[in-house]
Image (cartoon, rainbow, N blue to C red):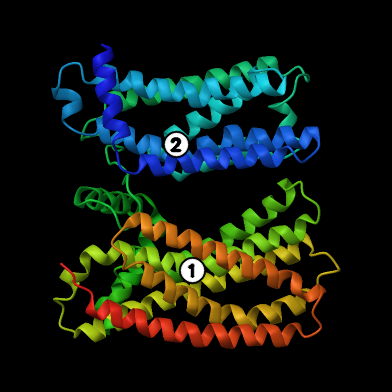
């Protein structure tokens, strides 16, 4: 029996990306734990609980469910004798470590009742398993309630404390979570092609997916549009334009990025950031929390559009050779791609920036920060920074190594974060703040335009197919 489990473990652990994601998750846990040591006891316990229990579940479940479904959503799971048992035992062991052993060790180290952390982990984990198994957004509401109740100080003692008389409620929550975990294991062991959740999620990162993973990704996207009436209506309206007028290469390129038009996605992203920003301002325990909340949202507005452009282009790289067969020159085709990417980045930047401004007004930025001054300075340099970051992102997207692309993205994020945080503090110390912002804008614009030309020429010379 142990020989079978050993072979199953080799199957999971030899997957090429697992040794990248697992250390990153452990690093987040350690950063959260050590960061909690510098604060008072109650906040340290809350901080450690969220990062020690919640973050591994949030970050690891998608990978865990995807790997599990790839093992069972195939003919081998039914045709090979003795296939199901060893796989389920290994999967159950991993779940036991994440959802049972981890919260018990945490409660032992913190000296609190183990039933609350155990109920929190089982309930959150069970909800995540079903949400990812059925690829349904309906589970996001209860997941958000459970996760935020562990973060929000007035509610967090319900899960992480000794007193309160919540033992019976914790027991019910733990049993409910355990029931969902067992139901998921049963569903996983009995998957077949007729079931609605037979489709599997891609295991790799964008740009490194195999042909089979790309096929499954398209099937899942089509299923999402089929299920969602609003997504289907917006998609049909968007695609109907093909029959209404002659499309330029830029217009045609835009249809290859996804099922939903860019402006519609941007509006949804902006609305989600407003909700997230308001919630974040309530659950953050740091001093001067309003400005830190806005800083996080604005920093996302600076970096996310460029990273999205690079990811989209890398995802599309496998189809470029086929699309070059269209009746358009190579220059027209790549110019169309870059123009449509620029449009996507502009919509996303605008939506995220407006979302940050709305959050600033809703939660009230501290008086010592001049909101109008920050907005003007932001507009003086960030649009040029977007050009620079998009040029760098589409250049990195050419790299053949996916690990190198990820590493380049981290370096880019770190440099951008440093520049932004230094600029965000500048209004308090610089009397010539507008001049500095304008000079930054000119410098970033010139360098960005130069790098964009270099990236364009490199893509025109790229060997495809």
Residue at point 64%, 69% (across, down): 420
- In primary-sequence order, the first of circles 1 and 2 is 2
Q: Is residue 452 above or below residue 111?
A: below
Q: Is residue 138 above or below residue 250?
A: above
Residue at which label 2 appears: 61
Q: Dot 1: few (<14), some (14–19), or many (≥20) neighbours within 10 Å?
A: many
Instruction: Kindly tell me whether residue 135 is visible in this rendering.
Output: no
Residue at point 42%, 70% (across, down): 393
Q: Quadrant of the N terminus?
A: top left
Q: Is residue 132 above or below residue 172?
A: below
Is 265 on the left-hand or right-hand side of 150?
Answer: left
Please give the label number shown on residue 19: none
Residue at which label 1 appears: 305
Residue at point 60%, 33% (across, down): 52
The image quadrant that residue 443 belongs to is bottom right
Q: Which secondary structure, mark 1? A: helix
Residue at the outermost right position: 367
Total count of labels: 2
Instruction: Kindly tell me whether residue 109 is visible in this rendering.
Output: yes
């Amino acid at each position: 029996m142990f020989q079978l489990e050993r072979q199953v473990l080799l199957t999971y652990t030899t997957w090429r990306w697992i040794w990248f994601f697992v250390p990153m998750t452990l690093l987040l846990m350690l950063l959260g734990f050590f960061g909690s040591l510098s604060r008072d006891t109650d906040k340290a316990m809350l901080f450690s609980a969220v990062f020690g229990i919640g973050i591994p579940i949030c970050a690891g479940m998608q990978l865990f469910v995807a790997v599990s479904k790839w093992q069972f959503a195939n003919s081998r799971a039914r045709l090979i004798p003795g296939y199901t048992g060893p796989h389920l035992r290994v999967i159950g062991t991993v779940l036991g470590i994440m959802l049972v052993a981890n919260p018990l060790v945490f409660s032992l180290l913190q000296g609190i009742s183990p039933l609350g952390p155990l109920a929190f982990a089982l309930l959150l984990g069970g909800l995540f398993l079903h949400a990812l198994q059925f690829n349904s957004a309906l589970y996001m509401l209860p997941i958000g309630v459970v996760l935020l109740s562990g973060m929000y100080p007035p509610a967090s003692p319900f899960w992480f404390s000794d007193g309160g008389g919540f033992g019976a409620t914790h027991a019910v929550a733990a049993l409910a979570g355990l029931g969902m975990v067992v139901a998921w294991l049963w569903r996983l062991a009995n998957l077949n092609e007729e079931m609605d959740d037979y489709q599997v999620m891609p295991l790799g990162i964008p740009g490194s997916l195999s042909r089979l993973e790309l096929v499954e990704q398209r099937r899942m996207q089509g299923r999402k549009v089929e299920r969602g009436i609003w997504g289907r209506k917006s998609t049909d309206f968007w695609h109907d334009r093909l029959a209404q007028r002659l499309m330029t290469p830029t217009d045609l390129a835009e249809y290859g990025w996804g099922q939903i038009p860019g402006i519609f996605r941007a509006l949804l992203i902006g609305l989600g950031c407003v909700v997230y920003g308001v919630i974040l301002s309530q659950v953050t325990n740091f001093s001067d929390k309003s400005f830190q909340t806005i800083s996080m949202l604005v920093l996302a507005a600076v970096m996310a559009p460029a990273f999205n452009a690079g990811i989209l282009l890398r995802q599309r790289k496998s189809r470029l050779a086929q699309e070059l067969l269209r009746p358009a020159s190579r220059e027209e085709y790549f110019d169309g791609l870059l123009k449509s990417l620029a449009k996507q980045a502009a919509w996303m930047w605008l939506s995220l920036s407006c979302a940050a401004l709305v959050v600033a007004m809703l939660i009230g930025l501290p008086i010592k920060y001049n909101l109008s001054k920050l907005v003007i300075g932001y507009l003086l340099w960030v649009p040029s920074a977007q050009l620079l970051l998009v040029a760098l992102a589409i250049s990195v997207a050419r790299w053949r190594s996916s690990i190198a692309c990820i590493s380049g993205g981290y370096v880019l994020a770190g440099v951008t974060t440093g520049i932004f945080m230094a600029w965000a503090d500048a209004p308090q110390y610089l009397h010539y703040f507008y001049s500095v912002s304008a000079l930054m804008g000119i410098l970033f614009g010139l360098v960005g335009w130069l790098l964009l030309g270099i990236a364009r020429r490199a893509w025109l010379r790229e060997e495809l197919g």
